[in-house]
Image (cartoon, rainbow, N blue to C red):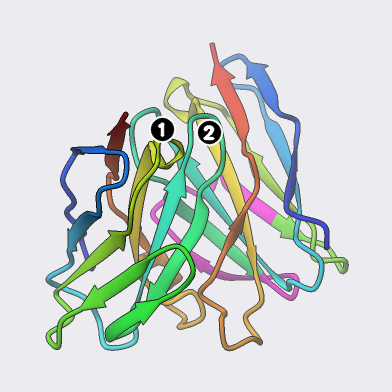
Amino acid sequence: LAKTTQPISMDSYEGQEVNITCSHNNIATNDYITWYQQFPSQGPRFIIQGYKTKVTNEVASLFIPADRKSSTLSLPRVSLSDTAVYYCLVGDLGGGSQGNLIFGKGTKLSVKP
Amino acid sequence: ETGVTQSPTHLIKTRGQQVTLRCSSQSGHNTVSWYQQALGQGPQFIFQYYREEENGRGNFPPRFSGLQFPNYSSELNVNALELDDSALYLCASSDLAASSYNEQFFGPGTRLTVL
């Protein structure tokens, strides 16, 4: 099973770039890496997904090294509304091994003015 | 485009009772996955339904069961409730036929309290 490890918490200030790293040493060949954001009393919200190298969308970038044993979510110029818990999810939803879908314990990001 | 909805929002049950939670998937999505999220923890995968069949299961006992209907909505049933079943239950929909099949859309969850 691809166990994931993330920092429990991070602090930042408005306007800064935030990088959150997730370790997943036992990632399988077919596994994807997906990051979600969750606010209190809400379901997780998809941020970004990747398999290898770098992926960028309108809200974040995801960096995955060649060995795929870790990944880094990069949030450019955070604002107060980015205060939330961020989870990395490793697995393959359609690969027949969905039981191996593993969410990390999440990183609580606090953005200060 | 309608998002994922879940009902009820909150539920209180006593130990030993049975509960049914409901989920309507996002329009066009054929897959529903259920997760249990204990307070302060990440979601744990319970099972997935694809085209009305169970398509994968996490480490949960058989008293956790589910259904998916022809319109792709889904139910999660939990029998013989235990105190540790108190959690936020999330459903997520996706489209396994799409290239973005690993992108899941989550509902707001059902908060279950077992007394």
Element type where label 1 sits in the image: loop
The image shows residue B56 at horizontal and vertical percentages of: 51, 69
Q: Is residue B19 left or right of residue A48?
A: right
Q: Quadrant of the N terminus of chain A?
A: bottom left
Element type where label 2 sits in the image: strand
* Residues under numbered marks 2 and 1 in contact, where contact means CB atoms less than 8 Å apart: yes
Q: Is residue A42 left or right of residue B107?
A: left
Tag 1: amino acid: Ala
Q: Chain of mark 1?
A: B
Q: Is residue B80 left or right of residue B58?
A: right
The image shows residue A6 at horizontal and vertical percentages of: 18, 51
Image quarter for residue A23? bottom left
Q: Is residue B16 magenta?
A: no
Q: Is residue B14 above or below residue A40?
A: above
Q: Which mark, by number, is residue B88?
A: 2
Q: Is residue B69 above or below residue A12?
A: below
Residue named by callout 1 = B38
Image quarter for residue A113? top left
Residue at 66 percent across and 87 percent down: it is B97
Magenta range is B50-66
Whether marks 2 and 1 lie on the same chain: yes
The image shows residue B36 at horizontal and vertical percentages of: 48, 42
Residue at 65 percent across and 23 percent down: it is B17
Q: Chain of mark 2?
A: B
Q: Residue furthest top?
A: B115
Residue at 54 percent across and 11 percent down: it is B115
Q: Is residue A61 above or below residue B60?
A: below
- For the residue carrying disc 1, how many other residues have a C-alpha within 10 Å: few (<14), some (14-19), or many (20+)? some
Image quarter for residue A61? bottom left
Tag 2: amino acid: Leu
